[in-house]
Amino acid sequence: MRRLQLLTGGESHGPGLTSLLSGIPAGLRVDLDLLRRDMRRRMHGYGRGGRMKIEVDEVEIRGGVRGGETLGSPIALWIENRDFDNWRAVMDPLEIDQKKAELRRLKSPRPGHADLAGGVKYLRRDLRDVLERASARESAARVAAGSFARMLLAELGTEIRSGVRSLGPIGADSPTPTWEEMLGVDEESPLRAIDRTREAEMVALIDQAADDGDTLGGAVTVIAHNVPFGLGSYTQWDEKLDGRLARAVMSVPAVKAIEIGAALTASRGPGSAAHDAIERGDDGQWRRPTNHAGGLEGGVTNGQDVVITAYKKPISTLRRGLPSVDLDTLEPHRSQYERSDVTALPAAGVIAEAMVALVLADAALEKLGGDSMTELEAHHQATLAQQRAWPRR
Ligand SMILES: Cc1cc2nc3c(=O)[nH]c(=O)nc-3n(C[C@H](O)[C@H](O)[C@H](O)COP(=O)(O)O)c2cc1C
């Protein structure tokens, strides 16, 4: 990111997670309800393992905010791991019980996880040293930071939502959703599915996979609505906003493919069916009867909704294990089971929203600038006036 910087720290079963977000201007009012709602939403979803019942993530603001307003300084956030007491003997930062640690040692790398690659890279004998940081638990720290980006975007009138588009084969052929469909996603429903009529089928598939000791993947779509015109740039490869969004959303654990707009369908048909006609309304607004491009042309936002779909592989930890090797004997051994989700698609959508919010807020700050929200808002209004007058002067 160019104007925002985000670092997170902390292990899955360690004392807690830290987020450090710098670049948010001074004078942004903190919406605690929004922050709490996002944290709760990340924990929601049918098919999650036992941990979601232990952890009630609460975010403590430890810096960068005073009296409910940001100061322009780095925002420091802390999320305690409620489970740490059960893990202290194994995960204490300074002193651990070697016998207990040996019992909890991960010694047969799980296919699909960072275990083998991370063990070889960092030369760790106990693969717990890898899994503790590679775990998707870290994403809680990103969601907390992403809420601040979302608060900033709300000041510009931009909203972001997500929903589960497909689970395994169910809904895999569904058309690219619209913002209106996103508004219909029930945050309290088991899967936050875009097509609610298929939710019961999805729940049954998860139950079946759980019985079989297996797991599932699928796709989530994120839509950003009312995004300012002209974020990102075609002038350099690394300024293109489609690439910046793809990188950020691809970093969500287990996401392995990204689609902007209706790219998959478009790639299978002719150009005449792929591109969105340009019209000018009587009110002076630019209109596009379709949005196959997903709100981005040349890596620049074009006034339409930004639409990005993330395809997530099935969860890697299978209760029945997968073929692996025991690191002590170097003999074949099925991979160890660590408490795990059957699917985490609804949560992946919430994390993807946070990543989209961070990238869009970054691009908005890059275009509009300002150390304070007052300046940002003034620049925004001035830019809107210039854009409305274009191309006449
Ligand atoms: C919200 C969320 C929860 C996840 N929970 C699990 C889990 O319980 N068990 C598991 O094996 N993988 C889980 N994953 C996926 C792994 O974190 C991920 O596949 C692994 O770290 C390897 O990274 P990669 O798939 O990005 O290469 C989860 C992912 C997300 C987004």
Image (cartoon, rainbow, N blue to C red):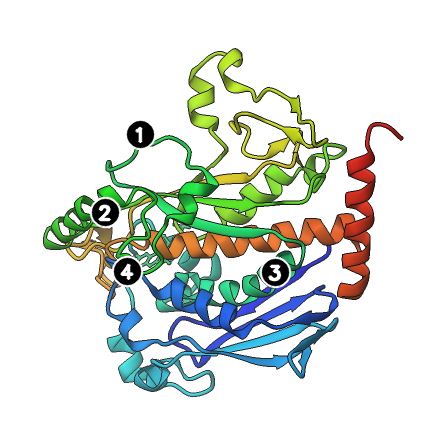
Q: Residues within 10 Å of mark 3 (few under 14, many from 20)?
A: many
Label 1 element class: loop
Q: Which residue is mark 2?
A: 199
| Proximity of marks 2 and 1: CB atoms separated by less than 8 Å | no
Q: Residues within 10 Å of mark 4 (few under 14, many from 20)?
A: some
State the CA–CA distance, disc 4 to disc 2. 42 Å
Query: Which quadrant does ligand 1 occupy?
Result: bottom left
Label 4 element class: loop
Residue farthest along the right direction in this orientation:
393
Residue at 29% across, 51% down: 315
Residue at 18% across, 48% down: 200
Q: Which residue is mark 4?
A: 327
In the image, what residue type sits under mark 4?
A: Leu
In terms of depth relative to the viewer, which is nearer, 128 or 345? 345
| Proximity of marks 1 and 4: CB atoms separated by less than 8 Å | no
Q: Residues within 10 Å of mark 1 (few under 14, many from 20)?
A: few
Residue 326, horizontal then vertical, whole percent: 24, 59
State the CA–CA distance, disc 2 to disc 1. 15 Å
Question: Tag 1 or tag 2, which sits nearer the N-term?
Answer: 1
State the CA–CA distance, disc 3 to disc 2. 30 Å
Question: Tag 2 or tag 4, which sits nearer the N-term?
Answer: 2
Q: Which residue is mark 3?
A: 149
Label 3 element class: helix
In terms of depth relative to the viewer, which is nearer, 276 or 233? 276
Q: Which residue is mark 1?
A: 173
Position of the C terminus, as image quadrant, is top right
Question: Does 373 appear above or below 32?
Answer: above
State the CA–CA distance, disc 1 to disc 3. 32 Å
